[in-house]
Image (cartoon, helix red, strand yellow):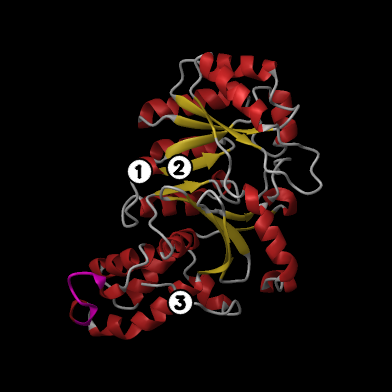
Amino acid sequence: MTAVMHPQGDHKRSTSIARLHTLKQRLHDAGAAPLHAQRILRAWSHALPLESGRRRPSTFFPAALRANVPTIQAELGALARVHTVHPGADGSERLVVALGDGHMVESVLLPRGGLCVSSQVGCAVGCQFCMTGRDGLLRQVGSAEIIAQLSLARARRPVRRVVFMGMGEPAHNLDNVFEAIDFLGTVGGVGHKNIVFSTVGDPRAFERLHDATVKPALALSLHTTRADLRRSLLPRAPDLTPQALVDEAERYAQASGYPVQYQWTLLEGVNDSAEEVDGLVRLLAGKRGILNLIPFNTLDDSPFQRPTWARCQALARTLHERGILTKLRDSAGQDVDGGCGQLRARAIRIAPAPAAARG
C-alpha cells in the first residue's frame, strides 16, 4: 500500500491514529477482525499494495471494512510524508519527513538495508554536540508515526534493519518506542537482533528492555569514561557513571545474547586522549560489546571540532591492539552537512510553522 500524499493541514485525521493501539482500534471499529487488520498493517508497513496477498480484499474483507478501506488508506498516508530527500555519496539517503501536524523529523536510509528512525521531535537531553536538542523537546513521535517512517523508507528501497538513532531520546518515549519495536519484530518483519534501541542510559529503559517480548539489540551512547565530562556533554541525561552504564549494558547483553554497541562521538581535544583510551580499556575489556567511534559531524556555531581522519584511525587501531573490538564509522550525511537534526533545522527555516506552534 503506497503512502498517500496529504496536505499538512489535515491535522485531526493524521494525529488520531498516531499510536498503533489507536490505529488497531480504528481498524476494529471499521469492521476488521484481527486477520484483516494484520493484512492491512502488514501491507502498509511493507509498502506493498493491499492486493498483493493471496486472498483478494474484495472477497477476504467483510463489506463494512471494504467500504472503509479508502479512508483508512488516506489516514495512514497522512501520518507522514517525505518532505525532502538528500542522497549521500555513501549510498545513504537522508529524508526530512513531515508528520501530519507539520512537525518534521529525520529518517536515514543506510547502506545495506538499514533505516534510522526518529522517536521525538527535538530532544530534552541537550547533548552539547548535537543539533537535535538545541530547541528542546517539542513533542513525542507516536508509535504509528515511527512505523510510517518505515513505510516511507520501504517505498524507496528494502529495509531489513531498524535503528532508533535518529532525533530524540528513545528512553524518554518508552511506550511509543516499545510499541513500535513489538510491531517491527512481528508484523513489520524485522529480525529482533536487527532492531537497535539506542539510549544515553536510563534505569527505566534498562528495566523495559529486560521485560520486552521483542528484545532489541542495545546501543549505548557513552562518549566519555569520565563522569564529570559526561555531565557536561550530556547535561540532562540521568546522572549515572560510565561504570554504572556499562554494568547495566553488560547485564542486558548477557540476558539477550546480543553484543552492546557503545557509541562514541569523537570530539577533538575532548574525548580523544590517551586518558580516555586507558579508561575504555578498563571499562570494556572482556565485555560483550563493540565500540563504534563516530567522528563528530561539524555544526554551525559549535565549539567542537572533528578530529582528522588519520587521528581517528590511530585511535581505533590503538584500542583494537589493546583488546577492544572497535569500528570506526563515518556517519551518513557528511557530504550534505546532514548530521542528525541539521537538515530538519534548515527545512523549518523555510517551512510554515506547525499549527501547534502558530497557535
Residue 100 image position (x, y, % from top left): 56, 71
User: In the rendered image, which residue does mark 3 sit on?
Assistant: 4
- In the image, is residue 231 above or below residue 144? above
* Quadrant of the frame with the C terminus: bottom right
Could you tell me if residue 359 is visible in this image?
Answer: no
Q: Which contiguous range is marked in magenta?
A: 52-58
Q: How far is mark 3 from mark 2, CA to CA?
A: 28 Å
Amino acid at the residue labelled 2: Val
Mark 3 Cα shell of 10 Å, populated few (<14), some (14-19), many (≥20): some
- Give yes or no for contact between labels 3 and 2 (Cβ–Cβ under 8 Å): no
Q: How far apart are labels 3 and 1 at the CA level?
A: 29 Å
User: What residue sits 71% from the left and 61% below the top?
Assistant: 346
Q: Along the polypeptide, which appears first: circle 3 or circle 1?
A: 3
Question: Do labels 3 and 1 touch, CB within 8 Å?
Answer: no
Q: Is residue 291 above or below residue 169?
A: above
Is 327 on the left-hand or right-hand side of 134?
Answer: left
Residue 331 at x, y = what percent? 58, 43
Could you tell me which secondary element the residue under label 3 belongs to? loop
Q: Amino acid at mark 1?
A: His
Residue occupied by mark 1: 192
Numbered disc 2: secondary structure: strand
Which mark identifies residue 196?
2
Q: Secondary structure at mark 1?
A: helix
Expressed as whole percent of the image width and height from the top left, the position of residue 227 reads 69, 24
Q: How many marks?
A: 3
Residue 165 magenta-drawn?
no
Name the image quarter holding the N terminus.
bottom left
